[in-house]
Amino acid sequence: MTVTASSGSTRVSPQRYDTLPLSSVRQAEQQDRFPDGGELETLVAFFQSGQQRLEAARRISENADFIVAKAANRIFSGGTPLSYLDAPLSVVSGGSSDATPLAADQAAFQRSVQTFAQGTGNSSGNLITRLLESTGGDADVRVVLPTGFSPIAVGRYGTDRMRKSLRDMGWFLRYVGYALVAGDPSILAVNTRGLRDILEKACSLAATNVALQEMRAAAAGLCKDNPQARELVIQYFNVLLAELQVATPSTRQRLGSPESQGLQLPATYALAADGKQRFIMRPRLSGAQKAEVIRAAYRQVFERDIAKAYSQTPCPVEASQVRQGQLSMREFIRSLGHSKEYRQQFFGRFSNSRAVELAFRHFLGRGISSREEFTRYFDIVSVQGLNGLVDSLINTLEYARVFGEETVPYLRDLGEEAQESAGWGSNRKLFRFSAPFEGAPQYVTLYASYRQPFADQHVYGGGNDPLALNFGAIFPSGTASVATRPAPYGYDSRRILIGNGMAQPGQMDSAQFRKAKPRRVGPKVVRLQQIATGGSSVPRRGGQPSIRGTEASTQAVINAVYVQVLGTAGYAGERNKVEEIKLENGDISLREFIRQVARSKAFRRRYWSGLYITKAIEVIHRRLLGRPTFGRWEIDAYFDTAARTGFYGVVDRILNSVEYNETYGEDTVPYERFVTATDRNARKVPGLNRPFDASAYANEFAQDKRPNVPVEQTIRTTGDITNRNLSGRRQIVVGSWTAQTVGGETMTASQPEDNFIAGPGSIRQAPAPTRRWK
């Protein structure tokens, strides 16, 4: 089965690093107990050394430029290291009154420049000097040069690669500071493992190794007065050096149900879950350890340690058989599922739908993958009852692959294995401690809603487009709650577009759709009318006859182009005067004039430079092609064009497209052809669809003391007109109208569905919501 769904929120992700306080209490948390003496001592030592750790991290941060420059001096020759930094690495002291950089920073900068400049002369002598330097110093931070290593010439390496190398060195140094504060080197292992292959292809693994050794020596030298902090700095740099020697681990395949095969978990996420304890019943374990494994089985099946908290010991006979090795853990889990305690707590008081969901959590450690899987096990529990449901889950090949015969089942959460994006929100709720107190089923309603038609929602956003100008990725706020029902959008999903006064458009992206023309009530179409001026051919036009636009037509077209493309008639200095003259003389086509306006600085400043790229593509697409994008697949195509050819490539692709050629051609100004349903609702004027109040209209009509005014000309209307006789008078229902009186007075109205009663030689407005005289 293929599930096309969005993961909902980027903020829901596993924590890919560990901290010493967290790792100290994790085992106690898994065993439902208080921290023991050893764990408390570890926490006490961590908090007592907090000031020293922070001081070491502060020194590294304040002298980052010096440390990176010293490493660059070791592996590069022929340049100044800090000149390739995009921004200073060192921080500015926030506690000083003058808010100036630290004196150590300035001195480090000068030293780094001087040191690096010395290496630009004799390369062989510089290498000998470095070899001599490496023989001195402390033994635990001595730099060992690999065989055949030589400094890299900056001139051959290139400016861009030089900047990237210094950026990466700063990245390594920052993560060492993070590890110092966290008290755990896992953040280094998780973020470094797998970089070996990248460094070997991109630059030099040997040079990176030497640079890290030099940074280790420089950072350790800053902490000579604090042996404990110095030891930690060296330890964390050694973790970096060790992890760079490890090849990139392969991704972990999910061993889940047949409906979710093929899902992969990146290696970095798998590393984040290595610290969690697994409970395995082995014959060589002591009696206390076996009792702890039995309690872990209780915690998994009953979601709490019922033996310790409630003095309940389900299946005592089977538990003793497990300790003696006469019964496997798999069969003990089965007996717990068949017990009366489990039936009372998780089956008798729940509907069959919720009982299936809870059973998946207890015996497979995950939620339901798909509607088909839910239906299959719902049939089992309906026919065979609870015992049949438990047996069917434990007898699966998935249980045998993941847990085997001796491992206690565990929650396979984020970081444990790959997750289906279609159901991660329900998994979050199912894995909570309060899950047994929620009786309403979640997965059956979730997957049922996926089968229903979805609303006109933007493929990059988390909600409907409130306005026509709100496109692109809609970033969630910091306080937004995480959605648990992601919208099932994929590359094959489309928006539903409504014709903006267009004739029958046919199917999307078809010839009939592209050639759809507006009706009389649709958008105004402005075309360039050209006339032949006669005479001989013009050399600059390649021998073509002289053709130019009429004066009135050209000016109207130019103004319409600015209004459509720029959004305004153009401010001072924004109009393309040269291209306007060329269009008037017939030297360029209207499409080429539109191209130049779209390429102008004014257009780029408004709709490209200040917007993120997906929103810019959406707005430009509406301006030049007159409709929203169909879906994510169309945005991705323009995104690829923008990545390859930039802003001008996006403009040229739209103007050179088949749809633009068939819709507008060479002589038509683009106009808005299609809108979304949300656009249509947002453009409605509030209050126009209110019910008719006859008494209010009669009172307003009675209070109108203005005399009748004789009419000189026929009423000119711009909306639909309905004429019918009403007691000898004619009632005109119009969208808007203008009447010229004998005295030259003009009367106008613009409310739709207003009633105007005209008598012989006079006109009077019947009670209407608004009325304007001028």
Image (cartoon, rainbow, N blue to C red):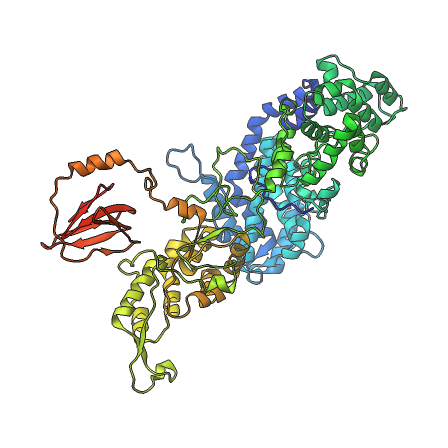
Q: Is residue 298 left or right of residue 615?
A: right
In the picture as drawn, the residue positioned furthest to the front comes out as: 727
Q: In the depicted view, which residue is nearer to us: 168 or 53?
A: 168
Pick the front one: 439 or 147:
439
Identity of the residue furthest to the left in this view: 743
Query: Can you name the residue that lies furthest to the right here?
Result: 326
What percent of the width, then of the height, locates residue 410?
73, 30
Looking at the image, how many numbered discs can be counted on the residues? Answer: 0
> Along the horizontal axis of the image, is 51 left or right of 144?
left
Residue lying at the far top of the rendered structure:
311
Q: Is residue 748 above or below residue 353?
A: below
Residue at 48 percent across and 53 percent down: it is: 83
**Percent position of residue 509, x then y:** 52, 60
- 49 or 632, nearer to the observer: 632
Give the answer, above or below, for where 639 lies relative to 751: below
Instruction: Look at 40% across and 39% down and name the residue there.
Output: 100
